[in-house]
Amino acid sequence: MGKVLIIGAGGVGTVVAHKVAQNPDVFTEIMIASRTKSKCDAVVKAIGNPAIKTARVDADNVDELVALFNSFKPEIVINVALPYQDLTIMEACLKSGVNYLDTANYEPKDVAHFEYSWQWAYKKRFEDAGLTAILGCGFDPGVSGVYTAYAAKHYFDEIQYLDIVDCNAGNHHKAFATNFNPEINIREITQNGRYYENNEWITTQPLEIHKDLTYPNIGPRDSYLLYHEELESLVKNFPTIKRARFWMTFGQEYLTHLRVIQNIGMARIDEVDYNGVKIVPLQFLKAVLPNPQDLGENYEGETSIGCRIRGLKDGKERTYYVYNNCSHQEAYKETGMQGVSYTTGVPAMIGAMMFLKGIWKKPGVWNVEEFNPDPFMEQLNKQGLPWHEVIDGDLEL
Ligand code: NDP
């Protein structure tokens, strides 16, 4: 059905490559390209399909990307490099006539700030070029938006309260490690919290608000209110929402390490001079922390991510909880990666599949909740991320 180019050969890129290779009826030719070609070759070796091509590319460089796109001629690029590369890859897509999908919104390297405005600004150019860009197609953002669209379509006349709840109840047996790129992860968590209520954004101190939430098959876990990017698009696309929040679980050990990292200046993202060499402390820290890709083997337990929604149906109040639990060990057995990479990579593959099947194909720049959720939800059940629903249960929120 179509040619796909995956950019990025980290934890998420590895899962995307495995899942794409498992669906040869949709993805007829595959290339994986990244800054370090040997990592792409290692992924291909692990999959055991020598037909998958590999290439080196610096995705910060539009000309290099254009040269690669023009030689491989993919129909769609799955961008699972870092959020810093989103705009250069989108530029290159426009120059080469290639469609686009990513899992995280653009973030400039020198400010820990993310929002959709930079990428939404490309809407007209993608429309005029007849190209589709699908933004935020991992789990959260990604499945969280598809769940919300599915709830709006099938269960509610009006969604009023939305809480996205993200629990990782896994144990990787390391003193401290992050589950995806440490630089991006620490930047996200150390920011102020933010949520939406009655047409306003309310800012909190980092990790200021927290409460115990009960996760299926896991039990109660302390959950912290964070700002997360899909809140921005969901309140825009579902204007009946009165309040939207995002919660993520953290253990005390993790938070203590994080506090120390911040207090000693290792979370800084500005350059410091070290013996005449300019280094960014957080980037240096990444180099000494465990690689998220290597956590899988000893990772036990599971993740549980879902949407807890309250609203109106036929004039009556209703609640709806839709979620997936994903076992780190099962993810590892299938792809060699842990559950957080798995829950991101599978939806990215499904998004590209939706595009190639012509179901999620419309010129412009879109967030996932702007497409038909039903065929995506069907694929989640088939591709390793089955979901469950609780109707009119206690949301705790
Ligand atoms: P990793 O750090 O493991 O992998 C990133 C990959 O991108 C590496 O292979 C890296 O190359 C490559 N890369 C970085 N810079 C460049 C560049 N300039 N040119 C080419 N390749 C480059 O990250 P993850 O796999 O953990 O995460 C990937 C993405 O997924 C991130 O954007 C992250 O924010 C997103 N994510 C989304 C989630 C969601 O649910 N929506 C959840 C988790 C992650 P090298 O190996 O040489 O450094």
Image (cartoon, rainbow, N blue to C red):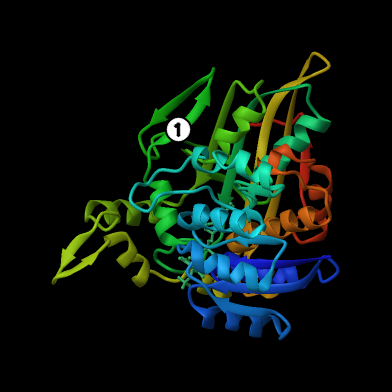
Q: Amino acid at mark 1?
A: Arg
> Residue, x 34% and y 54% (percent of image)?
258
Above or below 389: residue 25: below
User: Looking at this view, is 46 or 91 the one in front?
Assistant: 91
Above or below 44: residue 256: above
Question: Which residue of the protein is positioned furthest toward the top in this rendering?
Answer: 315
User: Looking at this view, is 95 or 349 the one in front?
Assistant: 95
User: Which quadrant does the C terminus fall into?
Assistant: top right
Question: Where's residue 178, x and y in %?
Answer: 45, 61
> Residue, x 23% and y 55% (percent of image)?
265
> Residue, x 51% and y 74% (percent of image)?
294
Q: Mark 1, residues whose alpha carbon is within 10 Å: few (<14), some, or many (≥20)?
A: many
Question: Where's residue 133, x and y in %?
Answer: 65, 48
User: Which quadrant does the N terminus fall into?
Assistant: bottom right
Hey, which quadrant is residue 253 in on the image?
bottom left
Question: Where's residue 379, x and y in %?
Answer: 81, 55
User: Looking at this view, is 386 or 199 the one in front?
Assistant: 199
Say left or right for 364 vs 79. Answer: right
> Residue, x 63% and y 60% (percent of image)?
96
Say left or right for 301 vs 270. Answer: right
Above or below 159: residue 92: below
Say left or right for 244 vs 194. Answer: right
Is residue 321 at least partly visible in the picture? no
Q: How many marks?
A: 1
Respond yes or no on whether mark 1 lies under 8 Å from ligand 1. no
Is residue 250 at least partly visible in the picture? yes
Above or below 297: residue 281: above
Question: Where's residue 159, x and y in %?
Answer: 70, 24
Q: Which residue is mark 1?
A: 194
User: Looking at this view, is 156 or 63 the one in front?
Assistant: 63
Hey, which quadrant is residue 184 in on the image?
bottom left
For the residue labelled by badge 1, is the local secondary structure a helix, a strand or a loop?
strand
